[in-house]
Image (cartoon, grey):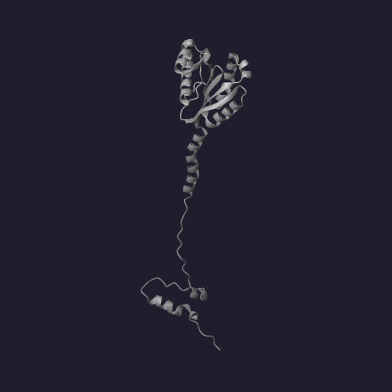
Amino acid sequence: MNSPRLESDTPPGNHPEFERSRKSSTTYPVRPTALQSTFHPQMVNYPEPVVMVRPLPALGRITDFLVPALLIPYILEQMTKLCRLIYRSKTSWDSLTFLTNSLLRKLAVDSTSRNKEKDITGILLLSDESFLQVLEGPEDAVNALYCKIIQDKLHSDVTLISYEQIANKSFDEWSMRVLDLNDLPKPAREVLLLKYKGTEGYVDIPNDAPIAMALLLDARAFCLSEAESE
């Protein structure tokens, strides 16, 4: 018994679909169906068109370098961000006994060498038993130094007067300058006593930030004028 004849068993040359395509006006053969191509491997399958999208490796490389490059100024800015710290303190009675001019000079020399490495500048004022100091430099370095000052036996009752970020330094002449206000010439001391409160001939170290800054700037001016006269 013969098996039923399938349409797909028709030879390729006599297939109705092929005949219609040959008689049509178009010059392109009709693409065979999936069923025909399965039963007749000799029939040509026309591949689907493939759109090739070429990646842009150059753009990828640019972004790989561009983003970190854009962050460099911000990173450098954070690393070199400047600040100004002003504090006051008292000299301890034990250290006051040994707080001579020679000790102050040694303190200035030691502080200068250490601060210069860390780009810290400033001035330290001594009036009677009180210190007033301004520190300018990178935030991390200034904060670390202030923590050491708090633990220093030379200082007691350390009080932070002001802390602020700055664009430029105002005391960049010295890595550290130590000045005893009592060593200033009499006319200079009288000027300071007129501008600021004083007790028994000593200038009182202010607690107010603007007044403390003004006193430090006046002391800076005296130091610069003294240097010019020399």
- Residue 155 point in image, percent of width and height: 59, 23
Is residue 59 in sight in this rendering?
A: yes
Is residue 175 in sight in this rendering?
A: no
Q: Nearer the viewer, residue 27 or 115?
A: 115
Name which residue lies at 52% across and 34% down: 79
Q: Nearer the viewer, residue 1 or 129?
A: 129
Q: Is residue 145 left or right of residue 70?
A: right
- Residue 10 point in image, percent of width and height: 48, 80
Q: Quadrant of the N terminus?
A: bottom right
Name which residue lies at 58% across and 14% down: 101
The answer to which quarter of the image holds residue 157 is top right
Residue furthest top as drawn: 186
Q: Nearer the viewer, residue 222 or 58?
A: 222
Name which residue lies at 55% across and 20% down: 130
Vertical comparison of 169 with 22: above or below: above
Q: Nearer the viewer, residue 111 or 134?
A: 134
The answer to which quarter of the image holds residue 89 is top right
Residue furthest right as drawn: 94
Residue furthest left as drawn: 25
Q: Is residue 135 left or right of residue 23?
A: right
Vertical comparison of 105 with 58: above or below: above
Residue furthest bottom as drawn: 1
- Residue 26 point in image, percent of width and height: 37, 72
